[in-house]
Image (spheres, rainbow, N blue to C red):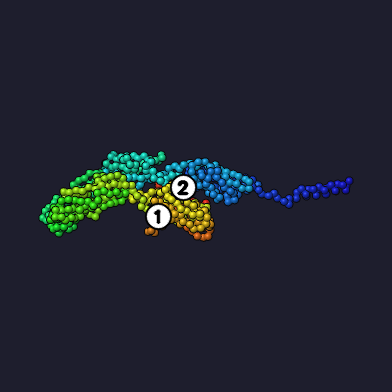
Amino acid sequence: MKTSQLFAAALAVVVSACVNAPSSSTSPVVLEALELKAPGDTFSVRSTLQLQAFGLYSNGERQRVSGEVSWSSSDPDTIAIDQTGVARLVKAGRARVAVKLDGKEAGHSFVVSAATARGLELYPNDLFEAPRGLTPQLRLYATFSDGTRREVTAEAQWTASGAGTWPMQEPGRYRLDAQGDVELIARFSGLEARKALRVLPASPVSLRLEALESPLRPGESLAFRAVATFTDGTSRDVTLDAMVRSLDGHIAEVQGTAVRGVAIGRARIVAQYASVQASRYATVVARQLVNLAGNLPHADVAGGRSVSFRVVAEFDDGTRQDVTDAALWSSSDVAIAEVGQDVGEAGRVTGRQQGFAQVTARYGNEAVAFTVSTTAPVLEDVGLSLPSARLVVGQRATFAVYGRFSDGAVVNLSQVALLRSSPLVGATLAGDLLELDGAAAGAAAVEVEVSGLIRTLPVTVGTEAVTELVIERRVSESGGFSRSLRAIARYADGSTADVTELCDWSSADPTALDVSALPGQRGELITGQGGATRISATMAGHSASFEVDP
């Protein structure tokens, strides 16, 4: 009995030891679920999002796995996603972004909304005073939630407060008919912009010397008039207030309000009143004018370009003399064709709006008429917003083709451009911009052609990934800081490049200070209501920010 009790006790100790001994093997850690982290559900077109993927493991840990998962979009035309988790919101609509790893899947649905206006700017921004009768042209620019900025002058509602000021038929143009303080108001998409303006008395805009068309003989006098035209459209005889002198007193001299012939020849008579000046030639002759002839009866001229008419006086002694600078020139419609009056500019007609006008030259008792047809402005030059580009394989970038026309207008011509690319770099139309796609490593050139004008964009596509993106303030020519930023990318091989035009730019508070996203102007700061804000730039999955305090 005693022996059996001892055996039972020993057996209990052995069993207890086996039960409490540590295990020699552990369970493997496995991925149990994925989690897709997004900053929200609804965003505007052209936004760029950095999404993150996390793995939930059997040991309770949560780890970032953004670089290990495969990324996909249910509608790449709405949301394009790359394999670093950078999502580009291309157009309005709905799409789901999903991630997969080791048989696990997670996703997030997004709503992409159309961009909305977030700020308005009136230009010119340095217009504070204007004389009565002036018709200033204002332009309105809107900044949208997707970072874009465009002119909305024709879409806005224009009003004014203050007596004698009202908007004209052309959007953004006002007529100022009374002195005083007024406000010019533009409304667009629920937003309003105002410009305070002080209307001053009418000021002279031009001066002309009249009654000097007839030739003089030595010893004869010819009375003249100096007539000023003012901003309100009125004209007034300012002969007694103007300063008039002869630059060739040995041929003709000014005596009071008349010019007296001294010797045969031409004398230049100059008049000045306030800030405007006029000049004419007085001709002293020993012959009689019998006819006035022009060099051509009709001319076609494109808007913004000029053509020169000349007139020749024919005299009774059979001689002929070019009197273009001495003749009095006028146009039947200066809004269509404007003609110069001063020496060196006389007879030079500049096309303005499309249409027909008659230009007349008078000399002595004779006159000759010319007809002018002003046609549409013509394209004179094209330029690219992106002079050159360095891309990483798979990277895309947008740029624009701008055309400069004969009337000075600059227009985005991207939609009518012909593109010639290479297998290394693709080039396609994307809305009102052109898009580059770095398909394979190497150096290539993209040719852009508009109306026979060809520009070349050199593109380098490399395999070196971007490792860092930095924003810095540009330095002006004077050595101080300018009103624009630039983005510098550092690559895996240690090289750097200016990638300002390749980045997507945004402002944390566009109402305080915004940043331009327009091709050719990316990184330029846009004045708002004032205050500090953070400006961000994104490219190839990298972001950088810059604190700006005006």
Q: Earlier in the sequence, mark 1 or mark 2?
A: 2
Q: Does residue 239 appear to the left or right of 191 in the view shown?
A: left
Gap in angstroms between the C-alphas marked 1 and 2: 31 Å
Residue 266 percent location from the top left of the image: 17, 56
The structure residue drawn at horizontal position 68% and vertical position 49%, both measured from the top left corner, is 28
Q: Is residue 319 shown to the viewer in this render?
A: yes
- Please tell me how many numbered marks the rendered image carries: 2
The answer to whether residue 209 shows anywhere in this view is: no
**Side (left or right) of 291 relative to 428:** left
Q: Identify which amino acid the numbered label 1 is placed on.
A: Ser
Q: Is residue 97 left or right of residue 160?
A: right
**Crowd class of label 2 (few under 14; some 14 to 19; many from 20; radius 10 Å):** some
Residue of label 1: 482
| Foreground of the two, 275 or 90 | 90
**Residue under label 2:** 430
Query: Which residue sits furthest left?
Result: 219
Would residue 310 be found to the left or right of residue 421 on screen? left
Quadrant of the image occupied by residue 248: bottom left
